[in-house]
Amino acid sequence: MRRAWQGGGTSRSDADPDAGVETGPTQLNLLGPLEILVSGVTVSPGGAKPQILFAYLCLHANRHVSVDNIIEAVWGEAPPSSAKKNIQLYVSRLRRQFAYATGVRLITTSDGYQLTAESDQVDLERCQQLRQLGQESLHNGAPKEAGRLLREAIRLWRGKPLSGLTHTLVMQAEAARLEQFRLGLLMKYFQAQLADGQHFEIIPELLATVADHPHQERLRADLMMALWRSGQRHAALATYREAYQLLADDLGIFPGRQLHALHQAILADDADIMGGLTTDRSVSP
């Protein structure tokens, strides 16, 4: 037995009169603090726990999610005895509150729920699509188009993902997964920009990203490449020295083979080796 809520399928008289949600397109945004827009108006699903429930379903949009997994996401390893009833209550309220939101369905199955939405309604899914298109363009030798698509994907991010909703290990892991996805997206974007010859233009973004991820050698390599190709050889070499010291002091390791080879190429002003490193180096997350 499956029961479904779908925006537009409930008469206005059946909805919660306090909800105040007009019929209109719905946007579910996860790439920053949870944001739900209906006809351009921000709507809140309630307190922290209903927000976590809704965010977790959005993270797994168009896939079945068991009640047990939802409970672990909302309460962690020590849920109250009333957890299942509370989940039912939260879902019931969500259905009333979003009764007029179009394009989204909340389906109840025998042992869980599934939130279904079009890919362009969930910013995470749209971002994943743009990243895939960007990768394909880069693979097909169109770095300018790849850079445009990847930049569009990056612009979907509004801040720290799931901010304020990481009270449990499950949600902390989900937030970390999104952060890693964003890092991989940035790496792919930098690769496209370097392939397109936008060396000088991406230096500020690379500097900021390296500052956020100081131990990430691939970012250091991209920054060194951008600096060297912009005529800033001394700055490129200084970037390597900084990485060498930081990795040794913080992690007790030394730069890997590729970063070391890039350093040697810059020292030798070896354009052939530099070009080979640029085209061969993969930055898939």
Image (cartoon, rainbow, N blue to C red):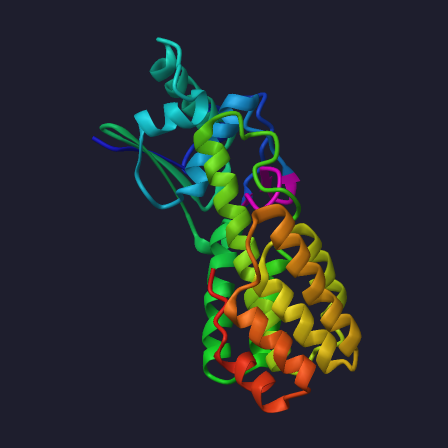
What's the magenta region? 27-41
Write down the quadrant of residue 272 in the picture.
bottom right
Query: In the rendered image, is residue 107 in sight?
Result: yes
Q: Position of residue 31 (x, y in %)?
A: 58, 46
Query: Can you name the residue that lies furthest to the bottom here?
Result: 272
User: Would residue 52 be found to the left or right of residue 66 on screen?
Assistant: right
Q: Position of residue 122 (x, y in %)?
A: 50, 49
Q: Position of residue 175 (x, y in %)?
A: 52, 40
Q: Position of residue 262 (x, y in %)?
A: 60, 76
Q: Relative to the observer, which residue lies in front, 146 or 78?
A: 78
Q: Relative to the observer, which residue lies in front, 207 or 236?
A: 236
Q: Relative to the observer, which residue lies in front, 252 or 157?
A: 252
Question: In this rendering, is residue 177 above or below 10?
Answer: below
Task: Determine if the magenta segment contains residue 36.
Answer: yes
Task: Determine if the magenta segment contains residue 170.
Answer: no
Give me the residue at 70% from left, 79% from top.
198
User: Would residue 226 be found to the left or right of residue 188 on screen?
Assistant: right
Question: In this rendering, is residue 158 above or below 202?
Answer: above
Q: In which quadrant is the N terminus drawn?
A: top left
Write down the quadrant of residue 39 in the picture.
top right
Give me the residue at 74% from left, 75% from top.
227
Q: Relative to the observer, which residue lies in front, 158 or 258?
A: 258
